[in-house]
Amino acid sequence: MRKGIVYLNLFICLKLDQLYKLVELEVKGHDTAVLKSYEWFAKTAARELGITVGNCWSLRKPNKNRLTLLKSVFIYKKHRVQYEIRTQFHFLQFHNLTGSTADTFLEYIQRNLPEGVAMKVTKVAVQALPKHLVPPEQAVNVEESK
C-alpha cells in the first residue's frame, strides 16, 4: 500500500513544464514617462533572467476618450465641460520561455507594476502534433509500405 503512495507522489512531481514560444505584454497607462520607465525595468529584469527580449514598441498616438458633461446637473444646457482621457499603450515581446521561468518572471514584473498602469499578458504555447496528424514525408512512407 505504501508503494502506491510513493509512485503517486513521484508521478505528481514529474509533471512536464509547459513551453511558450512567445509571451506578449500589453501595458497601458496615462503617463508616457512611467510606461517608458517600466519598459526599461521589464527588459532589464528579462536580461538578468536570461530571457530573450523580442520587439518592444508603442502606438504613436494615444487613445482619446472624450466625455462631455453639463456644468449644472439640471439646467443650463448651453454650459458644458469636456474631459479627455488619453491612454498610452506599450507592447513587449519575450521569446522561448519555459512555464516556470514565465511564471517567475511575470510574478516579479506584476508585483512591481506602477500605480495607474494596467497589464495584459498573452502566452503562445508550443504543443506537439496530435497522433492522427502526420508530417507529409512520413505519410508518403506509410502509404508505400502498405
Image: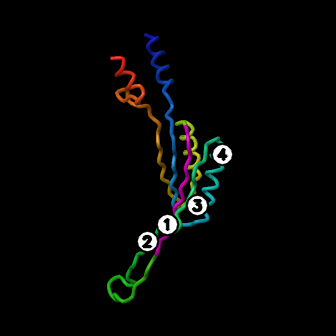
Estimate the x, y position of residue 99 in percent, counting from the top left: 52, 36
- Secondary structure state at the residue bearing disc 2: strand
| First reached walking from the N terminus: tag 4 or tag 2 | 4
Whichever of callouts 3 and 4 sits on the residue coming sooner in the sequence is 3
User: Dot 3 lies on which element?
Assistant: helix
Number of numbered discs: 4
Disc sitting over residue 47 in the figure: 4
* Residue 19 x %, y %: 51, 36
For mark 3, does the 10 Å Cα neighbourhood hold few (<14), some (14 to 19), or many (20 or more) residues?
many
Mark 1 highlights which residue?
87
Q: Secondary structure at mark 1?
A: strand
- Please report the bounds of the magenta region as a residue range: 84-97
Give the foreground label among 3 and 4.
4
Name the residue furthest front: 144
Left or right of 51: which side holds 87? left
Q: Residues at badges 1 and 2 in contact (C-beta under 8 Å)? A: yes
Q: Amino acid at mark 3?
A: Leu
Residue 118 lies within the magenta run = no
Q: Secondary structure at mark 4?
A: helix
